[in-house]
């Protein structure tokens, strides 16, 4: 009898522990990209392209010139930022070198992704600048002040450290140890920076009170005109959507141009499992 009770207690404890870990994971998933300042005004732009068989294919990337077009013609857009992953590239300072992953981004990156700035400032980021994580700063400089120091990046660019930001660990879908100027990427791309090259995630922060529907209508109007001017009428088959950033991480699957779930389905499944475990535990206690 005592052995049976012990088995019940162990089973109950294991089940409740599993349910707790599931709930913590669910909480973490639901928090991704939802904690930025003004998160209700942050959006990600995606591209719908009509294929030859009249199906719609959705890309999470946009054409490079779209950012400038929005800034020039749509006053409701407060901040517009496009990014591009660097992949692993070499970061060097004196005799120290590390292969790290970062993001190319426009100078207004931190006005959307408001990671805490620990040192320096991001007001004057330009093509000669780099912002680095606190972890990378410690690895490169120890306890020395990194602001104003020059880093060799990809064995090609010498960039001045203008800011150190808090390590990106939780609450964000981005994983980056540094932020490089998008201008460097653009220069490297050369002729590839055009309306026909879809290669960049694009994020928009709207002014308070702006209509999402009106803004995306204006985006499609100006983008269609410029793509048709560049490539002819076949470019008119591209339509952009603007989706809330705080829910995009969990709903990044698409079917024929419409959001069709994603990681949210795992959240729902595991939440149901956790609730079921708790109910069983409660009934046997």
Image: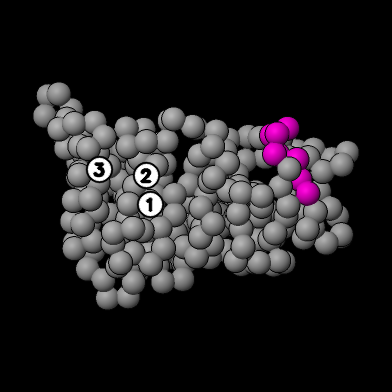
Q: Left of 152 or right of it: where is 3? A: left
Considering the whole magenta stretch, tell me its main secondary structure: strand
Question: What color scheme is it?
Answer: one colour
Circle number at residue 68: 1
Q: Secondary structure at mark 2?
A: loop
Res. 129 visible in picture: yes
Q: Left of 83 or right of it: where is 96? A: right
Q: Label 1 to label 2, Cα distance in Å?
A: 6 Å
Task: Looking at this view, name the residue that lies furthest to the left.
Answer: 54
The residue that label 2 is drawn on is 65
Residue found at x 38% / y 52%: 68
Residue found at x 71% / y 47%: 159
Dot 3 surroundings within 10 Å: few (below 14), some, or many (20 or more)? Answer: some
Res. 239 visible in picture: no
Is 90 located above or below residue 181 in the figure?
A: above
- Residue placed most toward the observer, 1 or 10: 10
Residue found at x 24% / y 31%: 231
Q: Label 2 to label 3, Cα distance in Å?
A: 9 Å
Q: Left of 221 or right of it: where is 138? A: right
What range is drawn magenta here?
150-157
Image quadrant for the C terminus? bottom left
Q: Secondary structure at mark 1?
A: helix
Q: Position of residue 83 (x, y in %)?
A: 48, 47
Q: Position of residue 53 (x, y in %)?
A: 12, 24
Circle number at residue 226: 3
Q: Secondary structure at mark 3?
A: helix
Q: Left of 213 or right of it: where is 268? A: right
Q: Are marks 2 and 3 in contact (CB under 8 Å)?
A: yes
Q: Position of residue 107 (x, y in %)?
A: 54, 57
């Amino acid at each position: 009898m005592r052995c049976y009770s012990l088995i019940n207690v162990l089973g109950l404890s294991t089940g409740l522990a599993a349910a707790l870990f599931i709930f913590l994971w669910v909480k973490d998933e639901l928090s991704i990209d939802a904690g930025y300042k003004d998160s209700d005004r942050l959006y990600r732009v995606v591209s719908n392209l009509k294929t030859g068989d009249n199906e719609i294919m959705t890309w999470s990337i946009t054409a490079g010139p779209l950012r400038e077009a929005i800034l020039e013609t749509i006053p409701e857009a407060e901040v517009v930022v496009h990014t591009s992953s660097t992949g692993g590239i070499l970061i060097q300072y004196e005799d120290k070198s590390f292969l790290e992953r970062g993001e190319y981004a426009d100078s207004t990156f931190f006005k959307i992704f408001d990671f805490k700035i620990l040192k320096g400032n991001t007001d004057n980021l330009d093509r000669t600048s780099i912002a680095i994580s606190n972890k990378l700063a410690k690895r490169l400089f120890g306890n020395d002040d990194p602001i104003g120091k020059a880093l060799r990046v990809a064995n090609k660019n010498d960039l001045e450290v203008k800011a150190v930001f808090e390590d990106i660990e939780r609450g964000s879908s981005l994983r980056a140890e540094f932020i490089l100027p998008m201008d460097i990427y653009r220069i490297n791309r050369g002729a590839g920076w055009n309306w026909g090259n879809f290669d960049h995630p694009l994020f928009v922060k709207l002014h308070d009170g702006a209509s999402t529907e009106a803004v995306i209508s204006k985006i499609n109007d100006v983008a269609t005109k410029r793509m048709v001017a560049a490539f002819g009428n076949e470019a008119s088959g591209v339509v952009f959507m603007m989706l809330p950033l705080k829910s995009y991480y969990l709903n990044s699957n698409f079917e024929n141009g419409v959001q069709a779930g994603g990681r949210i389905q795992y959240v729902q499944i595991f939440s149901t499992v956790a609730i079921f475990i708790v109910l069983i535990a409660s009934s046997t206690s």
